[in-house]
Amino acid sequence: MGDKLEKLREMLGEVADISHASALLGWDQQTYMPPGGAKDRAFQLATLNSLAHSKFVSDEMGSALDAASQEIEGADLDSDEARLIKKTRHDYDKQSRVPTTWVAEFSRTGALAHPEWEKARAEADFSIFQPSLEKLIALRREYVEFFAPYDHVYDPLLDDFEPGIKTTEVKAVFDALRPRQVELIQAISEDGAPVDDSVVRQNYDVQKQWDFGVEVITALGYDFEHGRQDKSVHPFTTSFGIGDVRITTRFIPDFLNTSLFGSMHEAGHGMYEQGINPELGRTPLADGASLAIHESQSRMWENLVGRSRPFWKAFFPRLQSYFPELLDNVDLETFYRAINKVQRSFIRVDADEATYNLHIMLRFELEIALIEGSLSVADLPEAWNSKFEEFMGLIPPDDAKGVLQDIHWSFGGFGYFSTYALGNLVASQLWEKIVSDIPNMNEKIESADFKDLLQWLRENIYQHGAKYEPIELLKRVTGKELDYEPYMDYLETKFKEVYQL
Ligand code: ZN
């Protein structure tokens, strides 16, 4: 490595250190911080985030970036060095357009909005959160203008999470996918054999749920030497460096799925970050390729592995040993069908695989309307409820089960939701390739052997971090563009079997 590149890496390392310190405070905010800490924490986060931002967009960084670019001229375009320059250039050009004062204001507003959202959600009263959300939307509308001209006002937000993907492309995929999903859900509800999920809705001791969850994610390959699990209201994964990637989960005593599949989901995110090539540490490449690629990893472990019959052939006897009084008289098939019950329901994070994307499409449309300004924050709860009825045939009984359920808007996270649905599509595309590359994948899962799968993911996805843009990575691995057919095939095959259609 030349002097100039080394200098750039040192400077990027300092920015990464500050960002990781901020992430640690953010983790604490959602796990252990007492409510009284919120105000001071808001200032601390704003200070660190604006410090990281101003260091990153400084003239000094710009010069270091130019010098390092010249130094590596002629290098292999796929090398870590060339990719580091490319990614840093993309982020630098983007973040340089955002004034540091905006970053501080946004960070402070988000940190203060969060407890308001928690309160509003606890009391199922949107009006408590409305003023904060209005401020956040105003700030986000200011933000997109830093990137004018754009094709679509939502593009700059989407690009923060899915580099290279446009709003119109996502819209086209969703428009094509939605009728297919609705048709499947319709067939299930009208002609499907009834599925009884009372077995997962018994009273499951929380400590035993925790212990079983830890056993499962350890078997999958989540590394507790380089991470830990805690509880939070809304489960998440956060990284303070490749050697310390933490996850959280939450428990509902009378619904087993929440923590079990939540833990597998977050462990999927965690394993991705733990598997990044350590050489990329403390640089902008020490990250996932995008949120959709990230989500493809969490959803793959949660659903394609964790909600499969082979998986439960291995783990149902283990689960029975934790809860003999609840499960000794239950057979594997009843349990398998129960965890795969399809039901139109209010809460996105508890949604089954068949209805999940509809929750996302609804948020995608509402976010676009809010950012465009065609929908006011005051009218949001009503818009949510009427769209929910249109998509799902249900009206939420209150705002907590409707517009207030997700954490994302509480910190101004707009542009984020569509990545969840895109992640489902990518997971199925990757899975097609995985089962063709790894012989007897199902037999391996049946014997709780995830080594080859984890190895494949490390080699093809994890190690690269953010070296490649999402679609580029997908094409490198599968040879194909983003495609929803493998996902629909998977859903139709699986649920037609579960529901005997
Ligand atoms: Zn996720």
Image (spheres, rainbow, N blue to C red):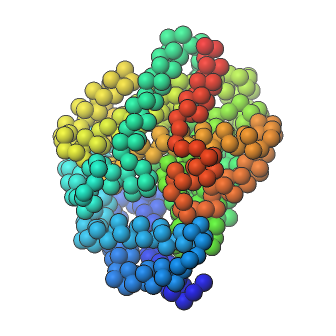
Question: What residue occupies the far front of the structure in this picture?
Answer: 74
Q: Judge left or right: residue 17 versus residue 490.
A: left
Q: Position of residue 298 (x, y in %)?
A: 57, 47
Q: Say if 11 sits above or below 188 in the image.
A: below
| Residue nearest the viewer, comparing 140 with 476 | 476
Number of marks drawn: 0
- Does any portion of residue 139 appear in the rendered image? no
Report whether residue 371 is seen.
Answer: yes
- Determine the residue positioned at 36% across, 59% down: 35
> Image point 30% across, 58% down: which residue?
110
The part of the image, by quadrant, that contains residue 378 is top left
* Residue 275 x/y as whole percent: 65, 61
Q: Where 34 falls versus 71 (above or below)?
A: above
Which residue is situated farthest in the top direction here?
191
**369 or 311, nearer to the observer:** 369
Q: Position of residue 100 (x, y in %)?
A: 28, 72
Which image quarter: residue 382? top left
Q: Quadrant of the N terminus?
A: bottom right
Q: Nearer the viewer, residue 281 or 475?
A: 475
Q: Quadrant of the C terminus?
A: top right
Residue 254 to residue 215: above or below: above
Residue depicted at 52% across the width and 42% down the height: 482
Look at 28% across and 48% down and name the residue there: 152
Q: 378 left or right of 348? A: left
Q: Position of residue 357 (x, y in %)?
A: 46, 34
Residue reaching furthest bottom? 3
Q: Is residue 95 left or right of residue 221?
A: left
